[in-house]
Image (spheres, rainbow, N blue to C red):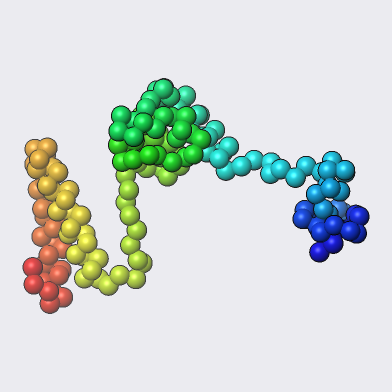
Amino acid sequence: MVCQSCGVNEATIHLTEIVNNKIVELHICEYCAKEKEVNTSPPVSFDDILSGLFDFTARQEGGDVDVRCSSCGVTYEDFKKSGRLGCEMCYQSFQTILMPLIKRVHGSTQHLGKRPSRLSGSIKIELEIKELSEKLKKHIALEEFEEAVQIRDKIKMFEKKLNKKGRPS
């Protein structure tokens, strides 16, 4: 497409404006854009937003922004610039900064996972038993026996449901 302003160069900048409820498109070359002083830089980048969120969270929670991962050497500044951690140990090194950020973004710091909405009944029951069994182990390890008994009873109830469907326990 040729520049609508000079009619010579190829249009590389495409602007869309709404004027009096009508869409007006302008296709111009870089030279004409500079001449007309058209701002071609994006207003805000995703990195800027992410960086601001990191800083805000770190300040709010009193996180140590001078942290460095003992394993890979990534600093908070590196993390802030790239939005990426260097290794699995970074999660421990930056925990005081990451946990409030994760909670703010996702609403929780515990991954709950996803399941297909059309799982068959017996598969749902098996998954529920598996999750409850993990919870049962944790409660027993913490010597929270009252909660463990309630979970054990739920597991037995689900196992009965499975047996009724013809599955061995």
Judge from the rendering whether residue 62 lies leftward or rightward of residue 149; answer left or right: right
* Residue 164: % across, % down: 13, 74
Nearer to me, 140 or 156: 140
> Residue 2 occupies which quadrant of the picture?
bottom right
Judge from the rendering whether residue 131 lies leftward or rightward of residue 142; answer left or right: right
**What is the quadrant of the N terminus in the image?**
bottom right
Image label count: 0
Query: Residue at position x 22%, y 62% from top?
Result: 127
Judge from the rendering whether residue 103 lies leftward or rightward of residue 15; answer left or right: left
Query: Residue at position x 10%, y 53% from top?
Result: 152
51 shown above or below 34:
above
* Residue 24: % across, % down: 84, 57
128 shown above or below 151:
below
Query: Residue at position x 32%, y 44% from top?
Result: 110
Res. 57 visible in picture: no
* Residue 122: % across, % down: 21, 70
166 shown above or below 154:
below
**What is the quadrant of the C terminus in the image?**
bottom left
Nearer to me, 116 or 143: 116
Most distant residue in the bottom direction? 166
Most distant residue in the right direction? 6
* Residue 43: % across, % down: 69, 41
> Residue 36 occupies which quadrant of the picture?
top right
Query: Residue at position x 13%, y 58% from top?
Result: 155
> Residue 163 occupies which quadrant of the picture?
bottom left
Res. 112 visible in picture: yes
